[in-house]
Image (cartoon, grey):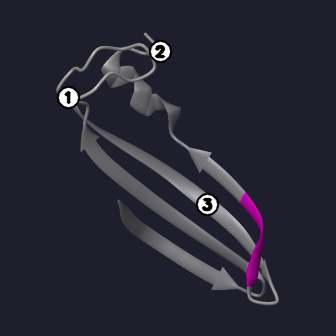
Amino acid sequence: MTVEDQVAEADGVATRWSASGTQLGSFAGAAPSGRCITVTGMHFHRVARGRLVEHWELNQLGALRPISVLG
């Protein structure tokens, strides 16, 4: 996993990340393919009194296509 960008302002933090790996086991009913996939996403957090109090996440479901889960 790689943190591509991270920005903090006021009580918010935004993180853009990517992760790569090889499908060696079954996933969501799909047999192991041996293919390398990359998933990207973003996390948004709100911080209050030194603690994370809210979290939102966006991620790339397109990463499931190379392993034939979405067709």
Mark 1: amino acid:
Arg
Residue at position x 57%, y 57% in the image:
42
Report the quarter where the C terminus lies: top left
Residue 11 placement: quadrant: bottom right
- Residue 35's tag is 1
Horizontally, is 29 left or right of 31 in the view?
Answer: right
In depth, the one of 21 and 27 nearer the eye is 27
Q: Which residues are magenta?
A: 51-55
Q: Which residue is mark 2?
A: 70
Residue 25 rendering spot, x and y as whole percentages: 27, 27
State the residue lying farthest toward the left: 34
Residue 29 rendering spot, x and y as whole percentages: 42, 13
The answer to which of marks 3 and 2 sits earlier in the sequence is 3
Q: Secondary structure at mark 2?
A: loop
Q: CA distance from mark 1 to mark 3?
A: 26 Å
Residue 37 rendering spot, x and y as whole percentages: 29, 37
Residue at position x 51%, y 32% in the image:
61
Q: Which residue is mark 3?
A: 43
Residue 64 placement: quadrant: top left
Residue at position x 71%, y 69% in the image:
45
Whether 44 is drawn above or below 56: the answer is: below
**1 and 3 marks in contact (CB < 8 Å):** no
Q: In the rendered structure, does residue 53 fall within the stretch colored magenta?
A: yes
Report the quarter where the N terminus lies: bottom left
Q: In the rendered structure, does residue 10 fall within the stretch colored magenta?
A: no
The answer to which of marks 1 and 3 sits earlier in the sequence is 1
In depth, the one of 49 and 17 nearer the eye is 49
Mark 1 is surrounded, within 10 Å at the Cα level, by few (under 14), some (14 to 19) or many (20 or more) other residues, namely: few
Whether 17 is drawn above or below 69: the answer is: below
Whether 18 is drawn above or below 24: the answer is: below
